[in-house]
Image (cartoon, rainbow, N blue to C red):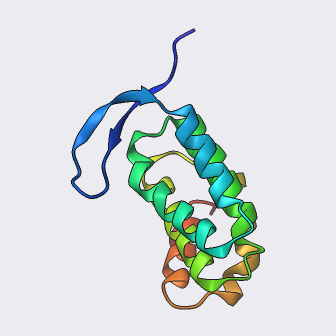
Amino acid sequence: MAEARVLVVTASHGRKTGSVSNRPAVLELIYGISAPQPAVRENSADAVTDVVRHLPDQDAVLLARLLVRISVTEPDLNCRESQLHALAELAQWHELPPDVLHPLASIQGEAVGSEIEYLDYLLGHVR
């Protein structure tokens, strides 16, 4: 069975640094997105946007499912904004099933600032 491969892109220089297994990076993102510390959750959601184009579809859907579950109960507004931004990027680059995004409707009335735009975009994929 072939191992999934992606190109790693450095955030500071945008250079390709080589082909490596994607699984450890995805597992690290999963851990960070679900971490108890708000700063770790926020940074991990931001990190999704750095690799979104290089993710296999199945990993993108997995991360989207987690981000949705976390964002609908997220108490920290900075984290939630980062989570919704990451979801919008995932939806732009990958085909996300509507049932993955549908739970976001439960927080649409609470949205502030850029969250409103992200939710409108994301829920547009559900309708």
Indicate whether 9 appears above or below 50. above
Q: Nearer the viewer, residue 4 or 98?
A: 4
Query: Which image quadrant is residue 45 in?
Result: bottom right
Residue shown at 62%/63% (left/top)? 127
Question: With 32 as the anchor, is 75 left or right in this view?
Answer: right
Rendered location of residue 59, percent (x, y):
58, 39
Query: Which image quadrant is residue 36 in?
Result: bottom right
Residue shown at 56%/60% (left/top)? 125
Rendered location of residue 101, percent (x, y):
66, 60
Residue shown at 39%/45% (left/top)? 53
Indicate whether 67 appears above or below 3. below
Q: Nearer the viewer, residue 24 or 85?
A: 24
Quadrant the N terminus occupies: top right
Rendered location of residue 23, percent (x, y):
57, 33
Q: Nearer the viewer, residue 125 or 71?
A: 71
Indicate whether 42 appears above or below 9. below
Question: With 7 as the anchor, is 64 left or right in this view?
Answer: right
Question: With 51 as the anchor, is 73 left or right in this view?
Answer: right
Residue 101 in sight in this render: no
Rendered location of residue 112, percent (x, y):
58, 91
Q: Nearer the viewer, residue 36 or 1?
A: 36
User: Farthest residue toward the top?
Assistant: 1
Residue 100 in sight in this render: yes
